[in-house]
Amino acid sequence: MKLLIASDLHGSARFCSELVCRIDAEEPDRILLLGDLLYHGPRNALPEGYDPMAVAEMLNALKERIIAVRGNCDAEVDQMVLEFPCGGDYIELIDRGRTLFATHGHLFDADELPYLAPGSAFISGHTHVKLLEEQSGILLVNPGSISIPKDGSASYAVYKDGAFALKGLDGTTLAERALPPAR
């Protein structure tokens, strides 16, 4: 299974368009979106190219491949324009017997993890800061933000064959790490 993982688009058609180009280049089986898709939120400035309806149209064109969770800036009205479900707070995917727990990051985070067996991955967005590190046998993965990165560069992640890669929006690999061994 190959996943492309992105978070915090915040309604930027410009950056969503670049993400769609990366999706075309990466050819993932599924696209995992970690919330904050259409609205910029009251604490964020409008991102470049802010056009939530254009973002909805781009994402809807990929609806058969999208798995999504709700972010803290996502609202019930967003679901009215999105043609794929994004109302859940988290989703658990199982690959090769290992759990990939995906959430936005405002309810669960690296300091408040749900129970996960060693060898699992905790995947979240919300902070707009890339992260790929192991903590107590759990791999913490944050793809950063597509449109409002707080660490200097827009990014996404790819999961394939038990390993994650953080990538810049130009496709450059920034970091790689395999899931820790299951105990």
Image: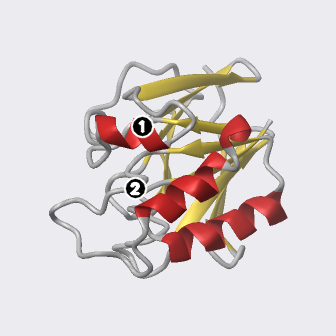
Between 121 and 34, the one lying in front of the other is 34
Name which of mark 1 and mark 2 comes first in the sequence: 2
Residue 80's mark?
Answer: 1
Q: Residue at x 33, y 30 (%)?
A: 113
Which is more foreground, mark 1 or mark 2?
1
In this rendering, is residue 101 above or below 47? above
- Res 47 quadrant in image: bottom left
**Lateral position of residue 54 relative to residue 157, left or right:** left
Q: Is residue 147 above or below residue 104?
A: below
Provide the secondary structure element on which disc 2 rests. loop
Q: Is residue 50 left or right of residue 32?
A: left
Q: For the C terminus, give its image quadrant.
A: top right
Q: Amino acid at mark 1?
A: Met
Mark on residue 44? none
Q: Which mark is residue 38?
A: 2
Left or right, residue 15 beside residue 18:
left
At a point 44% along the width and 64% down the height, the residue shown is 145
